[in-house]
Image (tube, rainbow, N blue to C red):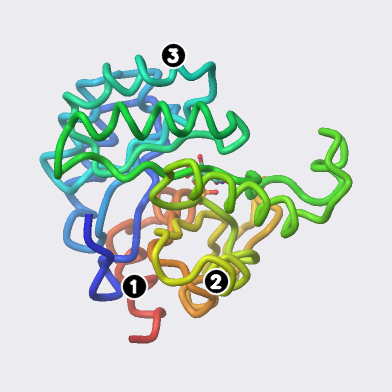
Amino acid sequence: MAKPSDSAARVIPALDTGDLTRAEAMAASLSGHCGLLKVGLELFCAAGGPAVTAIARHAPVFLDVKLHDIPNTVAGALRSLLPLRPAMVTLHAGGGPAMLAAARTEAEKAGADRPLLLAVTVLTSMDAAALAATGVADAPAAQVLRLARMAVGAGADGLVCSPQEAALLRAELGPGPALVVPGVRPAGSAVGDQARVATPAEAVAAGADWIVVGRPITGAADPAATAAAIAASIPG
Ligand SMILES: O=C(O)c1cc(=O)[nH]c(=O)n1[C@@H]1O[C@H](COP(=O)(O)O)[C@@H](O)[C@H]1O
């Protein structure tokens, strides 16, 4: 899928609810103010493939299932997901190069309109202490860069990272890889469980192609107006 050409197209609202009726209503109101809509684990676990089909009637779907398993199983999962025609699918970079390469081989069977494969690096909810608890003593940025280089080399089309690493990845990897950035908070919004955050304008200035915003939009009194305000806050 082509990179976004205007600010509204950069915005990906995360439809994090287990209620497909509510998700569809939000999708209908948000479709004019976003580039894609994200179906994540909460909605996909509750409603499965029909949720992707329903949301895709409103905007292209970013299917965020964060696949992470042995190569054969991840290839099989993608084979099962491709008929849903998502525009983007996530995998955990930590699954390693063989897993990512198997996913790429499988995705290419869908031809030219295959989904972009996005490798999740270090979750935006993790700070240095949380990363250290997993056995990685490096700072988050160093681990993000290590995983990103490996993932792009193994066939990922892009990366999911926090806004705090976007500039580093752009500088190190160039303009090619898609950078999809959650952990985005408009000024004054509650941070919640996110650890590495920045505003929409800061994320895009740092090199994000797309920004993922969940609760600040879905929890707002007027989600469509909030999404429009987020787009308007992004220069250019
Ligand atoms: O893959 C993702 O989209 C993702 C990766 C990550 O590192 N952090 C992260 O927050 N996300 C997703 O982005 C969304 C962020 O939601 P809010 O924190 O409500 O804006 C959620 O749907 C998360 O599942």
Cα–Cα span, label 3 and label 2: 38 Å
Cα–Cα span, label 1 and label 3: 40 Å
Image quarter (top left, top right, bottom left or bottom right) of the N terminus: bottom left
* Image label count: 3
Q: SS for tag 3?
A: helix
> Is 35 on the left-hand or right-hand side of 163?
left
* Type of the residue with mark 3: Asn
Q: Nearer the viewer, residue 32 or 151?
A: 151
Vertical comparison of 6 with 61: above or below: below
Q: Which mark is residue 38?
A: none
* Type of the residue with mark 2: Thr
* Type of the residue with mark 1: Ala
Q: Residues within 10 Å of mark 2 (few under 14, many from 20)?
A: many
- Residue found 24% across the figure and 21% down from its top: 49
Vertical comparison of 70 with 5: above or below: above
Q: Which residue is mark 2?
A: 199
- Residue found 73% across the figure and 50% down from its top: 143
Q: Earlier in the sequence, mark 1 or mark 3?
A: 3
Q: Which residue is mark 3?
A: 72
Mark 2 vs 1: CB contact within 8 A: no
Front tag of 3 and 2 = 3
Q: Residue 205 placed where, x, y %?
A: 49, 80
Q: Which residue is mark 1?
A: 231
Q: SS for tag 1?
A: helix
Q: Earlier in the sequence, mark 2 or mark 1?
A: 2
> Is 4 on the left-hand or right-hand side of 229?
left
Q: SS for tag 2?
A: loop
